[in-house]
């Protein structure tokens, strides 16, 4: 099977491509490299020992995307491309609506033209906004609190309408909770640009010495230690979930929560990371951020039942793998400059 992965050079994209290659599938990666590095793809080839195709294009360029579909016998698409920083989306809403919505529309148009109708979409637990109860099930109300989350809701609705108009589409909406961790090799991991918006990269930057201390937003939540609780799922588990969803795909629109079903507080994460790195993680307490909720973690029953998938890696392993990546790459991919053209060679 030939699988197109959009946003392939990104954090989740690189790990997902690695899992697809390990499963002996053929991969075509597409990425405009606006928030990723080409070297991530080269390292995926190094780890897997397999070569694959790569195209540096923007999905909003329908003509360029059409040429990719004409060149390969693509059977399925995993759509991971998109802008994803919540705070940035609040400051730049038009950029997010333009990029995330238009790229998806162009992709679906080209897919339909080439009769490729198997699609896995990278959604987010952000579609739930402030959950009314936990654990959060797939039929919980959607109520995004940011333009980023709203783009996910709108795209989910677009894809549902697409299936309503043509019942041959096979669409999986994968709602990630909090992706974290890195591949065991330490060669690929999360390399955020600009303001750190996720806890684990923030903690690891403090542990490595690039930042003086962590800011913990709120210690007065109704939780065991007063700090917010989130569901952290290992990125390699997420990659395996994509493969499971690809094989389980059938006509229809299916929604899956991808998490562990268990939440950890900020202070628990700090303690676990300090143990994994054998380094202190200094922090200070600040006021709560607007929109943050006390607890958010997934009901993963459907993914276990229909996909046969569950997360097998826990918080300790997440922290160990994150630290291996961070300690081997203290500045992420920044020091590397690898020119990648059409093919990534193993």
Image (cartoon, grey):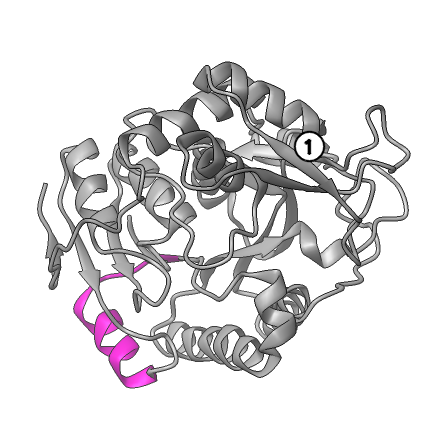
- In front: 26, or 132? 132
Q: Element type at marker 1? A: helix
The C terminus sits in image quarter: top left
Q: Is residue 187 magenta?
A: no
Q: Which residues are magenta?
A: 62-77
Which residue is drawn at the image coordinates 40% and 47% (left, top)?
Answer: 11
Which residue is drawn at the image coordinates 68% and 32% (left, top)?
Answer: 266
- The image shows residue 69 at horizontal and vertical percentages of 26, 70
- The image shows residue 141 at horizontal and vertical percentages of 84, 56
- The image shows residue 329 at horizontal and vertical percentages of 28, 36
Q: Is residue 75 magenta?
A: yes
Give the quadrant of residue 332.
top left
| Residue count near mark 1 (Cα–Cα under 10 Å), binned few <14, some 14–19, many ≥20 | many
Q: Can residue 163 be seen? A: no
- In front: 38, or 251? 38
- Going by the picture, which residue comes out furthest to the front? 212
Q: Can residue 27 be seen? A: yes
- In front: 160, or 269? 269
Which residue is drawn at the image coordinates 76% and 37% (left, top)?
Answer: 228
Total number of numbered discs in the rendering: 1
- Residue picked out by circle 1: 266
Q: Is residue 210 left or right of residue 251?
A: left
- The image shows residue 33 at horizontal and vertical percentages of 30, 64
Q: Is residue 69 above or below residue 293?
A: below
Q: Is residue 337 left or right of residue 319?
A: left
Q: Is residue 104 above or below residue 342?
A: below
Which residue is drawn at the image coordinates 55% and 27% (left, top)?
Answer: 281
Q: Is residue 10 left or right of residue 287?
A: left
- In front: 35, or 135? 35
């Amino acid at each position: 099977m030939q699988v197109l992965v959009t946003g392939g050079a990104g954090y989740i994209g690189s790990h997902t491509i690695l899992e697809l290659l390990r499963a002996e599938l053929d991969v075509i990666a597409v990425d405009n490299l606006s928030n990723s590095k080409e070297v991530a793809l080269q390292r995926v080839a190094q780890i897997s020992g397999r070569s694959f195709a790569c195209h540096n294009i923007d999905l909003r360029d329908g003509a360029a995307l059409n040429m990719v579909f004409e060149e390969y016998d693509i059977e399925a698409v995993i759509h991971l491309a998109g802008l994803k920083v919540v705070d940035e989306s609040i400051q730049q809403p038009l950029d997010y609506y333009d990029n995330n919505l238009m790229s998806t529309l162009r992709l679906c148009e080209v897919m339909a033209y080439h009769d490729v109708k198997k699609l896995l979409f990278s959604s987010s637990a952000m579609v739930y906004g402030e959950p009314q109860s936990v654990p959060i099930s797939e039929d919980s109300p959607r109520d995004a609190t940011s333009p980023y989350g709203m783009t996910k809701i709108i795209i989910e609705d677009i894809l549902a309408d697409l299936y309503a108009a043509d019942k041959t589409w096979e669409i999986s909406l994968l709602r990630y909770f909090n992706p974290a961790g890195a591949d065991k090799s330490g060669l690929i991991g999360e390399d955020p640009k600009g303001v750190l918006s996720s806890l684990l990269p923030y903690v690891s930057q403090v542990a490595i010495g690039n930042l003086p201390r962590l800011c913990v937003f709120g210690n007065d939540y109704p939780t065991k230690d007063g700090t917010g609780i989130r569901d952290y799922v290992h990125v390699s588990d997420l990659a395996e979930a994509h493969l499971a969803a690809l094989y389980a795909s059938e006509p229809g629109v299916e929604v899956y929560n991808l998490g562990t079903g268990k939440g950890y507080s900020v202070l628990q994460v700090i303690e676990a990371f300090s143990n994994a790195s054998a380094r202190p993680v200094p922090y200070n307490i600040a006021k709560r951020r607007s929109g943050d909720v006390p607890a958010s973690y997934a009901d993963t029953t459907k993914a276990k039942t229909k996909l046969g998938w569950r997360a097998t890696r826990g918080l300790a392993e997440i922290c160990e793998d994150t630290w291996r990546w961070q300690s081997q790459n203290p500045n992420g991919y920044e020091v590397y400059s690898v020119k990648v053209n059409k093919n990534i060679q193993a």
